[in-house]
Amino acid sequence: MSCCKVTWCNEETEFYNKTQRRSFCKKHYNYKKYASNAPIRPWLMYKVEKILDDTLQCEQCGYDAKTYFPDRPTNELAGLFDVDHIISDIKHTPEGEQPSNYQLLCKQCHILKSYDEGDFISKNNRK
């Protein structure tokens, strides 16, 4: 057996059958329900984990969409949140693509954090 492709997961993968094995553990294989492009965007696996752990709420302001929209399916509510890189300068590095550098933010908190950090400004034009 091999390990899950999610870099911070050490769980073994499971197999469909003898010839076709899946490359994710049982938990992370659920990404297909919530984020179809998660295999090429590791931070989305963090969001999937939050969904599966039933902790889909903003880690900054505490906004919980289920409180306001109890009848909406989880996959719709997931779109109200973004995964933010806490230290954006180390994005796309092995250290930067770990759960310790991720936080789940509601859209409003993410926009304000990005504004405060100047993320909308080209890196060449930042002071």
Image (tube, rainbow, N blue to C red):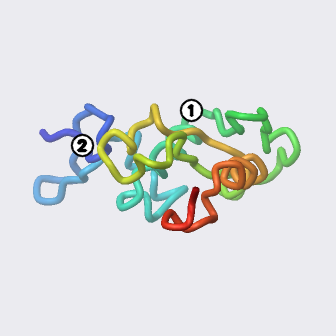
> Could you tell me residue 27's position as x and y percent?
40, 39
Q: Is residue 21 left or right of residue 81?
A: left
Tell me if mark 1 has few (under 14), some (14-19) or many (20+) residues whose alpha carbon lies within 10 angstroms of its own.
few
In this rendering, the label closer to the viewer, 2 or 1: 1
Q: Is the C terminus in the top left, top right, bottom left or bottom right quadrant?
A: bottom right
The three-letter amino acid code for the residue at tag 2 is: Glu
Residue 127 in view:
yes
The residue at 72%/34% (across/down) is 60
The residue lying toward the viewer, choosing from 75 and 106, is: 106
- Label placed on residue 14: 2
Q: In the image, is 38 to the left or to the right of 62?
A: left
Is residue 98 or residue 90 the one in the foreground? 90
Q: Which residue is mark 1?
A: 53
Q: Taking 35 as reference, is 85 above or below it?
A: above
Task: Return the residue nearer the eye: 67 or 58.
Answer: 58
Q: Is residue 59 above or below residue 105?
A: above
Secondary structure at badge 1 equals: loop
Residue at 38 percent across and 49 percent down: it is: 29
- Residue at figure coordinates x 64%, y 49% from the top left: 117
Q: Earlier in the sequence, mark 2 or mark 1?
A: 2
Residue most toward the front? 127
Q: Is residue 93 left or right of residue 121?
A: left
Q: CA distance from mark 2 to mark 1?
A: 20 Å
Q: Is residue 60 left or right of residue 91?
A: right
**Does any portion of residue 73 appear in the rendered image?**
no
Tell me the kind of residue under disc 1: Asp
Tag 2 secondary structure: loop
Q: Are marks 2 and 1 in contact (CB under 8 Å)?
A: no
| Residue at 12% from the left image edge and 39% from the top image edge | 1
